[in-house]
Image (spheres, rainbow, N blue to C red):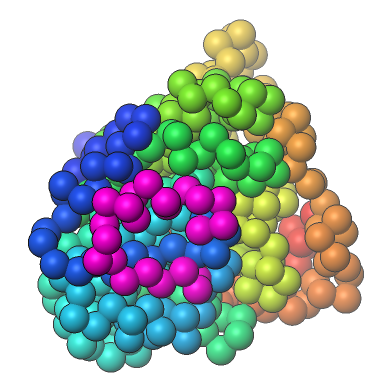
């Protein structure tokens, strides 16, 4: 067995109503509360904010948050003693990096990449309101720079102190968001399980459990949004997948999904769903044994049909889940046409930090072909 390292996630606080415990977790003093307008409008944060009367509220985080938004959050949080990220991946990502920048005063431009942020951030609690990104479990923040380029800061210094999983917060999510964010979590689990460099027995265990929970609960939460038990299982699954890919990073599906968000503002989960089966098809030769293992786990009835059949059954199972959840399947449905293929393929090549984790190489010509297949 090869040597490996594994990091567990933040301290987990889980259960219906868990978010109302935030005030008792945080240190005394003002906290910067990072969220977005949609979360505010839905009233999801009202009960929590009642318990944090001195909080400085920053609710201007947009989808695919920009450097400017991040720096505005940092300015708003000056003098704060702690930070809360409350919402989907975007508010949580901004909160992570804001907690670091407020405490250290460092220049953002020296932090891009892996392991560059070495200072001490403010105490940080992350509260997801979607079951998808797993951002509350990871030390990665993705920020959009210069209008379209996605850049990441990935460093253990960004791990949250507390992750709060409160299924009550996800009961009002619209079906389209529930489905797309659930597919994002599913892709995290699959890409962690097949990650080329850092996969290990621990990340495998988290990825398998996450995938099992998603396969069992994704359609339940789409069809019965009030099912708080299934909602809780999806939140847990997204968190477990987050821990898995915090250790065994995501790869080709995410590399090809990011340009769809960066240039066309396709939501992150939907971007992943659109590229999922095409990239898995490309990876099939290299990842067949692993896809077969996952296929046999999700559907024991395929255990006697051989590795090739199991791997194909796995990809078909995922495609079936995505379709049944009602997620768009073609790039044309989000306004992307053949005239965009060259741009997308060139942009995907910039995601080197993700492409190196793919089970097999993806060239620019491969990327163009995969986008074309997804049109
Ligand atoms: Fe993702």
Tell me the residue at 49%/25% (across/down): 228
| Residue at 83% across, 66% down | 336
Q: Which of 50 and 264 is in front in this view?
A: 50
User: What is the x, y in percent for residue 245?
Assistant: 38, 49
The answer to which image quadrant residue 28 occupies is bottom left
Q: Residue at x 85, y 56 (%)?
A: 333
Q: Which quadrant of the view contains residue 258?
A: bottom right
Q: Position of residue 365 (x, y in %)?
A: 72, 69
Quarter of the image that includes the N terminus? top left
Towards the viewer: 111 or 41: 41
> Vertical placement of 234 versus 268: above or below?
above
Please state the total of marks drawn on the protein image.
0
Foreground of the two, 89 or 152:
89
Magenta region: which residues? 40-61
> x%, y% of residue 247?
31, 50
Q: Quadrant of the C terminus?
A: bottom right
Q: In which quarter of the image is residue 299?
A: top right
Looking at the picture, tell me which residue is in the foreground, 110 or 158.
158
Whether residue 151 is visible? no
Give the residue at x 19% y 44%. Answer: 11
Q: In this view, does 79 lie above or below 275?
A: below
**Horizontally, is 53 left or right of 232 in the view?**
left
278 to 73, vertically: above or below: above
Residue 135 highlighted magenta (yes or no):
no
Q: Position of residue 235 (x, y in %)?
A: 43, 36
- For the question of whether residue 38 can be seen, the reply is yes
């Amino acid at each position: 067995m090869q040597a490996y390292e594994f990091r567990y996630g933040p301290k987990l606080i889980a259960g219906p109503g868990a978010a109302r415990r935030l005030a008792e977790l945080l240190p005394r003093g003002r906290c910067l509360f990072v969220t977005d307008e949609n979360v505010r409008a839905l009233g999801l944060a009202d009960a929590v904010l009642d318990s944090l009367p001195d909080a400085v509220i920053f609710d201007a985080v947009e989808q695919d948050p920009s450097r400017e938004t991040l720096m505005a959050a940092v300015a708003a949080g000056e003098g704060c003693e702690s930070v809360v990220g409350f919402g989907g991946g975007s508010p949580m990502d901004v909160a992570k990096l804001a907690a670091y920048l407020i405490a250290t005063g460092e220049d953002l431009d020296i932090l891009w990449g892996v392991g560059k942020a070495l200072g001490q951030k403010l105490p940080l609690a992350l509260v997801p309101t979607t079951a998808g990104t797993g951002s509350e479990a990871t030390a990665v923040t993705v920020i959009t720079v210069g209008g379209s380029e996605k850049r990441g800061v990935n460093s253990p210094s960004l791990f949250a102190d507390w992750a709060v999983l409160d299924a009550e917060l996800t009961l009002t999510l619209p079906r389209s968001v529930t489905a797309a964010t659930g597919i994002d979590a599913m892709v995290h689990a699959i890409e962690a399980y097949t990650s080329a460099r850092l996969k290990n027995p621990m990340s495998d265990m988290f990825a398998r459990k996450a995938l099992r929970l998603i396969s069992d609960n994704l359609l339940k939460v789409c069809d019965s949004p009030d099912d708080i038990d299934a909602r809780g299982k999806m939140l847990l699954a997204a968190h477990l997948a987050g821990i898995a890919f915090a250790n065994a990073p995501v790869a080709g599906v995410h590399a090809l999904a990011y340009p769809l968000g960066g240039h066309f503002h396709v939501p992150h989960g939907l971007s992943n769903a659109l590229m999922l089966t095409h990239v898995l098809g490309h990876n099939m030769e290299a990842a067949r044994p692993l896809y077969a293992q996952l296929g046999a786990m999700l559907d024991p009835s395929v255990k006697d049909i051989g590795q090739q059949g199991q791997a194909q059954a796995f990809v078909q199972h995922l495609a079936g889940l995505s379709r049944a959840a009602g997620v768009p399947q073609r790039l044309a449905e989000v306004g992307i046409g053949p005239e965009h293929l060259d741009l997308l393929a060139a942009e995907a090549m910039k995601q080197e930090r993700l492409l190196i984790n793919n089970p097999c190489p993806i060239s620019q010509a491969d990327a163009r072909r995969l986008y074309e297949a997804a049109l």
